[in-house]
Amino acid sequence: MDLKSYLPPFLFDSNIFTDLFIQYQAETDNLESDTQDLLNQLFPNTATWGLVLWEQLVGITTNTSINIEVRRVNVLNKLSQIYTMTASNMTDILKKFTDGLVSLIQNYSMYTFDIDFNVKSKAVSLLDLLQTIETIKPAHLDYSLSINLNPTAKGVYNAVCHVSGESISLYPYIATNIDVTPSVELGMYFHNIETSTLYPKEE
């Protein structure tokens, strides 16, 4: 609020009044800032220091090491469970993860929906994104997720980790040694875990 606009100009001919006015204006600016900050805490999508109170309300253990946007989404996820999750509501929640566009297409006859997720420059946690989708989507619906990176962005970084596991049981026992040497050629980190269990033939 500009207090000067509410006062006649001739008052500012006085140096004493001008000095006092500067202090009044500073106090008014601080009051406006504090009021807006307090109002921000009333909504989980803008809350900062008040976000911990929202987490307590919905039963989430506070973890300040998590990105604040993810914490806000987690609160919104919990609150969304009290009303019907619509395509519009889901889109609004997923928009919190990106600075790009998000669109959702419903395939009613197939009981599925497609998510088109666009990323410009904001870092996205794929694990948090998938967990959020699984939490908020109707349980009977399947979905596909398409993530598009903005090709004009400077410095696009993509990190992928693939972990797989396999358990093999052989009946009956035939060979004394079984060597498993998988060969994988992928443009990503690959961690393969295999467990082989051999059971001797009963006499």
Image (spheres, grey):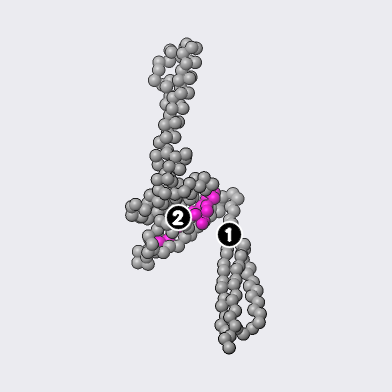
Label 2 Cα crowd, 10 Å radius (few <14 / some 14-19 / many 20+): some
Residue 150 as seen in the image, left or right of residue 3: right
Magenta stretch, residue numbers: 113-128
> What amino acid type is highlighted by mark number 2?
Thr
The residue labelled by disc 1 is: 160
Q: Quadrant of residue 4?
A: top left
User: Can you say whether 136 is above or below 203 in the image?
Assistant: above
- Where residue 93 sits in the image (x, y, percent)? 42, 51
The residue labelled by disc 2 is: 132
- Where residue 48 sits in the image (x, y, percent)? 47, 40
Residue 26 seen in this snapshot = yes
- Where residue 151 sits in the image (x, y, percent)? 55, 53
Q: Residue furthest front?
A: 203
Residue at (48, 23) in percent of width and height: 26
Q: CA distance from mark 1 to mark 2?
A: 19 Å
Of residue 86 and residue 84, the one placed in the foreground of this image is 84
> What amino acid type is highlighted by mark number 1?
Val
The answer to if 115 sits in the magenta stretch is yes
Q: Secondary structure at mark 2?
A: helix
